[in-house]
Image: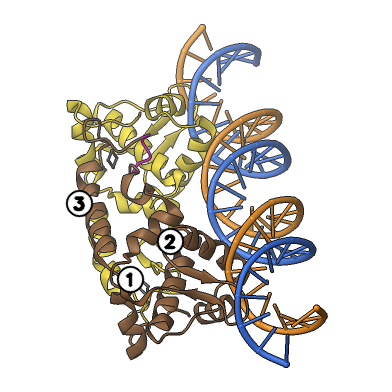
Chain colours: A yellow, B brown, C blue, D orange
DNA sequence: AAAATTAAGGACATAATAGTCTCTTTTTTA
DNA sequence: TAAAAAAGAGACTATTATGTCCTTAATTTT
């Protein structure tokens, strides 16, 4: 569904968001520990998020990654997915035709498209803010 | 979503099914041409379908692949997916946790699971027979 | 100013997926 | 019975995704 890089990116972003809610920055090392991901690889994907303007990075001692608190509910999971994996989740043909095209559909198109659309809508309307609450309350988890 | 191998397998199976409806066998060469897939690679996946008992293969001149006509509506797309990709589409955690577990859910679980379940149900209730009709009527396509 | 801390970036390494090639086996046809 | 037609099987190659390492740049602390 999502690439490994994208999975790490979303988990990392949720952790960064929850730290940001408390006015803290999250260092790469902390992130990798808290989401149980390979540090160097995670660094790569965070660089992409940073270049895409989704998170803010600060170098140097006491640096790390953060999200502007007032942005927490504006940042949607879809932005992370697009930044890392592009839009193929939403646009690819389920059976691998060159393009998913209403006018030249594969046999599975009519059945598949509603599911894909539902996924798209959910990802587009879920914000980082929406996903941090469960973490804080201990109802949801970022590792194991 | 599905692997390349699985995409080819589904497309191939639909073509084989439509040929079987007319009492014809489909040769590998015909299949690869009709679904525009790499012949040798497609051969691999067809072997798996054959070993899984989803399609019947016959060697020798006039051999090829076929589906028992009375089986056409019993063979569900889910069987092909399971045979080629296994059940990870249905069981993996969307954010890459080791397992998707109701009792230890990731932050996206509650939103993601309904979509995955919908996909599962659609794939489980769609038969090869369901997908051949559009092909025959020219409403759906297996290539380009 | 020097040392420590932290992210950025690029080259490299490994693993998984996708795809090819060649030879073998089975069956039919000439 | 020999040749041709087709799938089966395994070794091999290519490409992409995943992951590591090392050096550099920026910032803070001492
Ligand atoms: S054409 Fe295949 S999913 Fe749309
Ligand atoms: S635990 Fe992540 S999708 Fe179920």
Q: CA distance from mark 2 to mark 1?
A: 11 Å
Task: Name which of mark 1 and mark 3 comes first in the sequence.
Answer: 1
- What's the magenta region? B94-98
Q: CA distance from mark 3 to mark 2?
A: 31 Å
The chain containing the residue under callout 3 comes to B
Residue that appears at 35% across and 88% down: B136
* Beta carbon at label 2 within 8 Å of ligand 1: no
Residue that badge 2 annotates: B53
Find residue A133 and report its image quarter. top left
Indicate left or right for C18 with A140 as reference: right
Counting from the top left corner in percent of width and height, residue A35 is at: 38, 30
Task: Name which of mark 3 and mark 2 comes first in the sequence.
Answer: 2
Find residue A28 and report its image quarter. top left
Task: Name which of mark 2 and mark 1 comes first in the sequence.
Answer: 2
Task: Examine the rendering and report whether any part of residue A97 can be seen.
Answer: no
Counting from the top left corner in percent of width and height, residue B77 is at: 34, 64
Q: CA distance from mark 1 to mark 3?
A: 30 Å
Indicate left or right for B110 with A38 as reference: left
Residue that badge 3 annotates: B114
Ligand 1 sits in which quadrant? bottom left
């Amino acid at each position: 569904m999502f690439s490994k890089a994208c999975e790490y990116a979303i988990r990392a972003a949720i952790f960064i968001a929850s730290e940001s809610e408390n006015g803290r920055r999250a260092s790469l090392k902390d992130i990798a520990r808290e989401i149980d991901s390979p540090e160097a690889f995670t660094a790569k994907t965070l660089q992409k998020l940073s270049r895409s303007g989704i998170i803010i990075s600060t170098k140097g001692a006491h640096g790390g990654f953060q999200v502007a608190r007032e942005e927490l509910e504006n940042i949607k999971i879809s932005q992370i997915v697009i930044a890392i994996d592009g839009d193929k989740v939403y646009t690819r043909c389920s059976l691998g035709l060159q393009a998913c095209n209403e006018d030249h559909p594969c046999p599975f198109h009519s059945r598949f498209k509603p599911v894909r659309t539902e996924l798209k809508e959910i990802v587009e309307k879920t914000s980082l803010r929406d996903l941090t609450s469960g973490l804080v309350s201990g109802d949801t988890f970022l590792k194991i």
